[in-house]
Image: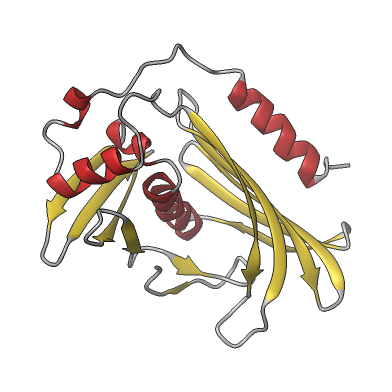
Amino acid sequence: MKPGFRTRFEREASRGLAQMAAEVLVTEEDLIGLPSLLQRYLRRVGAVGMPRVQNFFVRFRGEMRRGHNAGWMKIQAEQYSFLGREPARLFLVKGTLSGLPFEGLHCFKGPTATMQVRVAALFQVVDAKGAEMDQGETVTMFNDMCLLAPATLLDADVTWEEGADMTLKGTLNYQGHRVSALLTFDEDGDLVNFISEDRFQSSDGKTYLRFPWS
């Protein structure tokens, strides 16, 4: 019998947390050579003087839907992300679908991503994997780095191109995958949008549609 999603989630999280390295503080010198918009953003979020980010944990409450014409479902989710020797993104979500409880687990370990969803803890309705999943989760990882833990961008393999109207294009090379996004900042230096053409939508893990993702 396969372990439940919660068990797998906590097991992988414990493995990642055991890999903590010594703390290294972010300095002003670390920002030298970065685009001015990114330097300003990293200062604004308070990265300078704080430890470089090795991992982070987030809890979500919100809504999601399976497609453009589907209804919204209330969800709760937990996420661990690790940026060390064994990078990983673990995303555990639960909610209600057509009156039945469902639970899903995204695992992005190394270069490989998977997504599984079970209804009523018994019936597996999604088992997604493959090149589209790997690329899509790379975009999600990039978004997480920019929005949830910007200091991780200091150690990431990102090529930056400054654009017009407070925009910055970033191309991330991560675990053999290459994705790009356009970051937009406001006059205060806050990140207000992240748009990528490299992510896919799939409701069943078999059919993938490419849409702009923001």
Q: Is residue 142 left or right of residue 92?
A: left
On the rendered image, what quadrant is the C terminus found in?
Answer: bottom left
Q: Quadrant of residue 115?
A: bottom right
- Of 44 and 141, the residue lying toward us: 44
Q: Is residue 211 left or right of residue 68?
A: left
Residue 176 locus on image (x, y percent): 35, 41
Q: Quadrant of residue 126?
A: bottom right
Q: Looking at the picture, does residue 145 appear above or below residue 120?
A: above
Residue 67 locus on image (x, y percent): 58, 79
Q: Residue furthest front?
A: 188
Residue 137 locus on image (x, y percent): 48, 53
Q: Residue, x 13% and y 45% (percent of image)?
A: 36
- Of 19 and 33, the residue lying toward us: 33
Q: Is residue 109 left or right of residue 48?
A: right
Q: Quadrant of residue 29?
A: top left
Q: Residue, x 21% and y 61% (percent of image)?
A: 187
Q: Residue, x 27% and y 46% (percent of image)?
A: 41
Colour scheme of the rendered structure: secondary structure
Q: Residue furthest top?
A: 22
**Number of marks in picture:** 0
Q: Is residue 47 left or right of residue 19?
A: left
Residue 11 locus on image (x, y percent): 73, 30
Q: Residue, x 55% and y 18% (percent of image)?
A: 19
Q: Looking at the picture, does residue 147 appear above or below residue 154?
A: below
On the rendered image, what quadrant is the N terminus found in?
Answer: top right
- Of 57 and 175, the residue lying toward us: 57
Q: Looking at the picture, does residue 28 appear above or below residue 67?
A: above
